[in-house]
Image (spheres, helix red, strand yellow):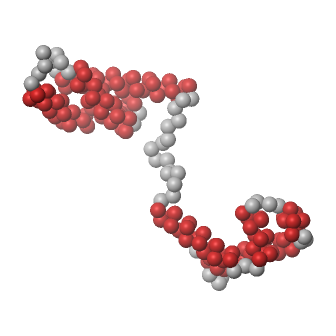
């Protein structure tokens, strides 16, 4: 026998009021068990969703909700412990640095790269090629010397010229750092 639409709405509304009124206390219950508040929030949300499945016939929904949160938190903690032992869990710490730079750092990096390209464009062709082979291609001084028919000493001198030139173009006439 199905309930009228209004009856289902009242049950859902009561469940939501119960959840919202006691959410902080439910999270406080789960947090010590699972080890952090963000996991505890997940557990409480899972309990809220599960409460709908188990709701018929519950005499004290608040006590049931606390018991459900506690049981789900214990299950979650056991699963995390097992995953850690098996090496299947590689959690990222909450305060881990982002893999990508923030927008300001990205803008500064792009700007510096643009200035470096402009500085390289003003180098004599042989000096630029030595710089590119060493700094961009990662080739050894000996390899560069053999490829361009230069002495290693000349390669070092050209690299020094290129570095001085780029430093002056990027950081001003004194060659200092920003």
Query: Which residue lies at the image location 65% right of the left edge and 84% below the top edge?
Result: 173
Q: Measuring from the top left, give residue 17's x and y in whole percent.
A: 16, 34
Q: Is residue 71 above or below residue 139?
A: above
Direction from residue 91 to residue 4 in the image, left or right: left
**Residue at the far bottom in the pictured view:** 173
Q: Is residue 29 visible?
A: no
Residue 121 sits above or below residue 3 on the image: below
Relative to 130, say whether 10 is above or below.
above
**Front-lying residue, 162 or 4:** 4
Give the percent coordinates (x, y) of residue 80.
46, 28
Q: Position of residue 66 (x, y in %)?
A: 25, 25
Residue 170: quadrant of the picture: bottom right
**Residue lying at 27% horizontally and 29% vertically, measured from the top left:** 49
Q: Nearer the viewer, residue 111 or 157?
A: 111
Left or right position of 64 against 78: left
| Residue 56 picture quarter | top left
Task: Find residue 31 and report its horizontal and vertical position in percent.
Answer: 35, 33
Q: Is residue 154 left or right of residue 114?
A: right
> What residue do we see at 47% from left, 62% from top?
103
Q: Quadrant of residue 175?
A: bottom right
Q: Quadrant of the N terminus?
A: top left
Image label count: 0
Q: Quadrant of the C terminus?
A: bottom right
At x 50%, y 51%, the residue is 97
Of residues 97 and 51, the one drawn nearer to the viewer in this rendering? 51
Residue 67 shows in the view: yes
């Amino acid at each position: 026998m199905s309930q009228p639409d209004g009856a289902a709405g009242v049950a859902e509304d009561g469940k939501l009021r119960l959840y919202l009124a006691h959410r902080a206390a439910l999270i406080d219950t789960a947090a010590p068990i699972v080890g952090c508040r963000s996991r505890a929030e997940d557990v409480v949300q899972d309990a809220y969703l599960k409460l709908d499945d188990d709701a018929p016939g519950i005499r004290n929904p608040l006590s049931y909700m606390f018991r459900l949160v506690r049981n789900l938190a214990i299950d979650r903690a056991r699963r995390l412990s097992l995953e850690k032992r098996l090496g299947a869990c590689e959690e990222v710490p909450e305060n881990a640095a982002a893999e990508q730079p923030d927008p300001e750092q990205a803008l500064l990096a792009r700007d510096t790269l643009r200035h470096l390209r402009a500085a390289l464009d003003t180098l004599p062709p042989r000096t630029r090629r030595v710089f590119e082979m060493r700094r961009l291609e990662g080739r050894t001084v000996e390899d560069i010397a053999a490829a361009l028919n230069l002495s290693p000493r000349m390669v070092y001198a050209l690299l020094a010229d290129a570095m001085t030139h780029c430093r002056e173009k990027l950081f001003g006439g004194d060659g200092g750092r920003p």
